[in-house]
Image (spheres, rainbow, N blue to C red):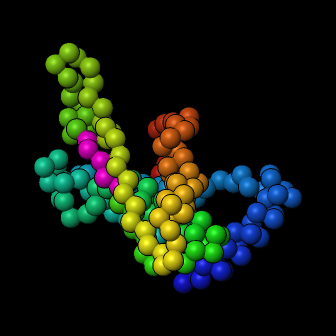
Amino acid sequence: MNSPRNIADAMERAVTVFTRRPDKGLHDDASARARWRGGTRITSHHASGASMDTDMPAELGGTGDCVSPGWLFRSGIAACAATVISMVAASEGIVLDALEVSVGSQSDTRGVLGMREVDGTQVPAGPAGLDVAVHIQAAGVDEARLRRLVDEGLKRSPMMDTLLRHPPVTVEVRMDEGLAG
């Protein structure tokens, strides 16, 4: 595990490089490739070779033996926020004793089923909102500073930024090419 000092040093080196060469900051992120495995089971793959299975709960035709894509979404938000909060803490010389980020939501399953409200409007498929709870401890660091640290970490979290900024989404559909292996 990297120490807070190693993390802070790495961040300082990156800032130095990107200050001199801002164009080096923009890069393509590793794509996620999801392949249908039958039913509602999906296997997502990372370029590193890592993979993860998802499935829907039994009530929606799945097996319920894997996490759902929605949980993976919330988990990604929580992990991203925790990661950046810990990076900000390290850059400020704060040694954390505990950090836990929980992300919850409330969704209407009717949206996934394509159902409509009584007035005919489509029920949204995504969460109505997200609840982010951060538990943080650092000996000798006052509450106000920890709150500022959390706020800064959430502002710099790529996933939180994506949710708040609503960047454009481009969709390409191909039907005439073979699937990648």
Identify which residue is drawn at 53% across, 45% down: 162
Is residue 156 left or right of 99 when viewed as pictured?
right
**Where are the magenta residues, as a range?**
103-107
* Residue 161 versus residue 67 in the image, above or below: above
Q: Nearer the viewer, residue 140 or 160?
A: 140
Identify which residue is drawn at 50% across, 68% down: 142
40 in the magenta segment: no
Q: Nearer the viewer, residue 105 or 68?
A: 105
Most distant residue in the right direction: 20
Quarter of the image for residue 8 reads bottom right
Q: Percent position (x, y) of residue 30?
A: 58, 58
Q: Nearer the viewer, residue 90 or 17?
A: 90
Q: How many marks?
A: 0
Observer able to see residue 62: yes
Q: Percent position (x, y) of residue 2?
A: 59, 82
Identify which residue is drawn at 18% across, 59% down: 63
Most distant residue in the top direction: 119
Q: Percent position (x, y) of residue 59?
A: 13, 49
Is residue 50 left or right of 90 when viewed as pictured?
left
Q: Main secondary structure of the magenta part?
A: strand
Image quadrant for the N terminus? bottom right
Identify which residue is drawn at 46% across, 70% down: 50
Q: Percent position (x, y) of residue 180?
A: 50, 55
Most distant residue in the left direction: 59
* Residue 166 versus residue 58 in the image, above or below: above
Observer able to see residue 80: no
Quarter of the image for residue 43 reads bottom left
Quarter of the image for residue 112 reads top left
